[in-house]
Image: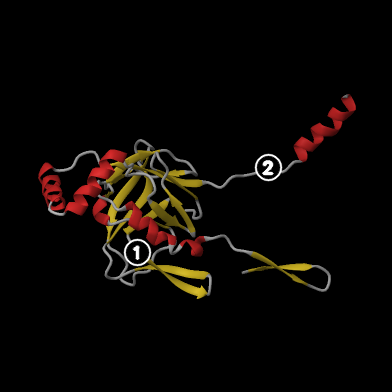
C-alpha cells in the first residue's frame, strides 16, 4: 500500500494544471417600468388586429420569459441567454473595454467559403452602439464601468471587441453612466434591460441561418512522408 502511495503522489505534482479561459458575462433583466401612455397606445394598436390579440392572449397564458433565448455573438462565438437572462463568453481580448451593439441583422464578409473575415452592420437596419470601459477612481481606487452611447462606424465595420445582441434597439435598454464593479480578469458587465414586445422567435430564426458560420473548425488529416499533417477546413 505504501509503495502505491509513493508512486501516485509524484504523479499528482507532475500532472499539468488545466487553466480555464477568463470570461465575459452579463445579465438581461426585464425592463422594470414602462410609461403608461406609451403602453396604452401600443396595446390599443394591437387590439385593432384580431390575430395579434389572439397571439398576445396566448403569450399571457404561457407566461413567456422575455429574457431567455436572446442571441448574441462575440469573437466568433454565439450564445443565447438562459432562463436567468445570463450570457457568458470566453474572454478573447485583453483591454477591459467592450463595444456593445444592438441590431437585428449583421452581414458576414467571407474570406473563404466557410471562413468569415469580418462582420459588418447593414446600412438600412436600425442599430444602437455603446462603449463600456472599465476605469478606476483615483481617490477611492474603486473600479467602475463607464457606459456611453456612441455612433456606429461610418464604414459599418464591427470592431473585434464587440458583443452584438440580436434585437431591435427599441426593445433593449442599456443604462449609460457609471456602474461599480470589481477588478477581475473575468469581466462582469452592467445589467441590460429587455422591454416587452421583443420578437425572440424572429430573431432566433434569423440566427439559425448564420449558425453554420459559428461552428468550430473541422480538422482534416493529410498523409505525409513520415506522419499525418493537420489541415483546417
Closer to the chain start, of discs 1 and 2, is 2
Q: CA distance from mark 1 to mark 2?
A: 41 Å
Can residue 167 be seen?
yes
Label 1: element kind: loop
Tell which of 71 and 206 is nearer to you: 206
x then y, percent, for residue 45: 13, 53
Can residue 63 be seen?
no
In the visual, does 112 lie left or right of 25? right
Tell which of 104 and 45 is nearer to you: 45
Per the image, the residue denoted by label 1 is 105
Q: Quadrant of residue 36?
A: top left
Quadrant of the image containing the C terminus: bottom right
x then y, percent, for residue 194: 29, 46
Q: Residues within 10 Å of mark 2 (few under 14, many from 20)?
A: few
Per the image, the residue denoted by label 2 is 17
* Residue at image point 51% right, 54% down: 92
* Residue at image point 48% right, 73% down: 110
Label 2: element kind: loop
Q: Quadrant of residue 231?
A: bottom right
Quadrant of the image containing the N terminus: top right
In the visual, does 88 lie left or right of 122? right
Q: Quadrant of residue 223?
A: bottom right
In the rendered view, would you say 124 is above or below 163? below
Mark nearest the camera among 1 and 2 is 1
x then y, percent, for residue 166: 35, 57
Q: Looking at the rendered structure, which numbered label has been put on residue 42?
A: none
In the rendered view, would you say 183 is above or below 212? above
x then y, percent, for residue 162: 40, 58
Amino acid at each position: 500500500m505504501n509503495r502505491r502511495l509513493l508512486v501516485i503522489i509524484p504523479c499528482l505534482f507532475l500532472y499539468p494544471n488545466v487553466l480555464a479561459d477568463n470570461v465575459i458575462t452579463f445579465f438581461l433583466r426585464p425592463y422594470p417600468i414602462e410609461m403608461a401612455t406609451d403602453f396604452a397606445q401600443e396595446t390599443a394598436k394591437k387590439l385593432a388586429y384580431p390575430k395579434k390579440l389572439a397571439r398576445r392572449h396566448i403569450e399571457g397564458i404561457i407566461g413567456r420569459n422575455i429574457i431567455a433565448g436572446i442571441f448574441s455573438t462575440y469573437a466568433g462565438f454565439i450564445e443565447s441567454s438562459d432562463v436567468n437572462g445570463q450570457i457568458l463568453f470566453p474572454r478573447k481580448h485583453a483591454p477591459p473595454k467592450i463595444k456593445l451593439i444592438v441590431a437585428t441583422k449583421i452581414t458576414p464578409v467571407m474570406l473563404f467559403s466557410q471562413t468569415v473575415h469580418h462582420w459588418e452592420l447593414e446600412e438600412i437596419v436600425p442599430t444602437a452602439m455603446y462603449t463600456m470601459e472599465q476605469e478606476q477612481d483615483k481617490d477611492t481606487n474603486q473600479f467602475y464601468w463607464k457606459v456611453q452611447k456612441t455612433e456606429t462606424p461610418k464604414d459599418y465595420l464591427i470592431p473585434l471587441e464587440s458583443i452584438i445582441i440580436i434585437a431591435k434597439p427599441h426593445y433593449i435598454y442599456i443604462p449609460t453612466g457609471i456602474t461599480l464593479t470589481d477588478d477581475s480578469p473575468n469581466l462582469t458587465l452592467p445589467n441590460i434591460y429587455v422591454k416587452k414586445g421583443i420578437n425572440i422567435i424572429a430573431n432566433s430564426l434569423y440566427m439559425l441561418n448564420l449558425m453554420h458560420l459559428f461552428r468550430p473548425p473541422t480538422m482534416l488529416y493529410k498523409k505525409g512522408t513520415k506522419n499525418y499533417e493537420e489541415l483546417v477546413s
